[in-house]
Amino acid sequence: MRLRAALDALDVAVIVADSEGVVVHRNAAALPFWDARHADAVVEDVIERAIPVALSGVPFDEEVALHGPPRRVLVIGARPLAGSGPGSSGGAVAFVRDITDLRRTESIRRDFVANVSHELKTPIGALGILAETIHGQVSEPDVASLVDRLADEAERLGRIVDDLLDLSLVEGQDAPNRDHVSAASLALEAIERVRAIGLERGLSIVDRTPAGTDVLVRCDARQVVSALTNLLDNALKYSEPDSEVSIEVGVVDDRAVFAVRDAGIGIPSGELERVFERFYRVDKARSRGTGGTGLGLAIVRHIAESHGGEVVVESREGEGSVFSFLLPVADPELPLS
């Protein structure tokens, strides 16, 4: 009785089924999804699909948007319950959690960032133009130096705003556009985008993908090239002159791996987990000198995760770093949608 009372006190709907899939208990929050009508019937249908999946030993998770009124966003999940004997099933538990407020807050935050960034672009651009105009009208070296600094900072602020807009776009996109694209071609396009930067800094950029190695990935090509360009640009920023930055495409466990390697300053082991945080910099002074915004790796991570992949880093301080951008290999037989 105490367990039932405890379950009834939860805001989360909980449905318990036995090993045959028969529901043996619903807490108070789950009652609206029993013999439900209208929008709640959609949730009941997902629960009925979730329980058999959990009984087979596989966790189930699905997000459902109900257009209402009122509009709600729910997460329906199910997990297997261990039985009394080895390998036996003790049934399954399903749950329904309302994340409407969380999604609304995320949407408000993204919209705020996007709107403020758009509003900032005009005055930042004006600052750059004014700095150029003043520079052409001054002769004192000290004043000219200050004007140059003003122009550089306005340009850097503009890059931060552009990155904020890119990050807001990636976070707000429900699902990227999907095409079957050659992984090798994505790497080559990213190299071409940063080749001039490498030449300017005295660095070579090498494609170390073995001949004949290629695979299709299902992705938004524009976003993935942007992510790879960010990784290559970072490698160039933190590499010493006359060194090499490379990218290599491979396949590991049905995932395409884009490995970007440099022989730069490396990352201390205690900071590896933080490099994908927004505005986090390992070497703050050097980042400012190279014009970094602190948002590039956060954008890379969101692009990878939105494609069902991930980005990982291996590094040793003083020896360089390897950033691996992983995407699922595409099955050409499956539809893109």
Image (cartoon, rainbow, N blue to C red):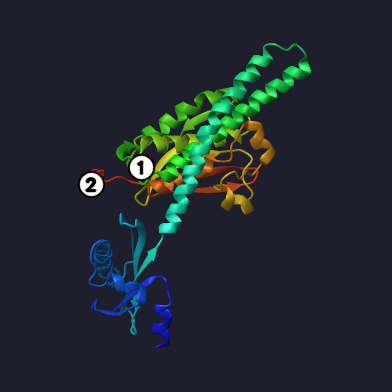
Q: Nearer the viewer, residue 244 or 157?
A: 157
Instruction: Give x and y (percent) for residue 258.
Output: 43, 41
Residue lying farthest to the bottom in this orientation = 1
Return the x and y of residue 219 as percentages of the image width and height: 34, 41
- What residue is drawn where x is 64% and y is 44%? 282
User: Does 213 appear above or below 192?
Assistant: below
Q: Earlier in the sequence, mark 2 or mark 1?
A: 1
Residue 135: image quadrant is top right
| Crowd rating for badge 1 (residues with CA inside 10 Å; few <14, some 14–19, many 20+) | some
Vertical position of residue 127 compared to residue 171: above or below: above
Image quadrant where one finds the N terminus:
bottom left
Tell me, yes or no, if residue 232 can be seen here.
no
Which of labels 2 and 1 is toward the front?
1
- Residue 263 sits in quarter: top right
On the picture, is 25 further left or further right than 123? left
Tell me, yes or no, if residue 194 can be seen here.
yes
Q: What's the residue at 64%, 46% (across, down)?
A: 317
Outermost residue on the front side: it is 69
In terms of secondary structure, where does tag 1 sit? loop
Amino acid tagged 1: Pro
The residue where tag 2 is placed is 334
Instruction: Give the residue number, with chain letter if any, for mark 1.
Output: 176
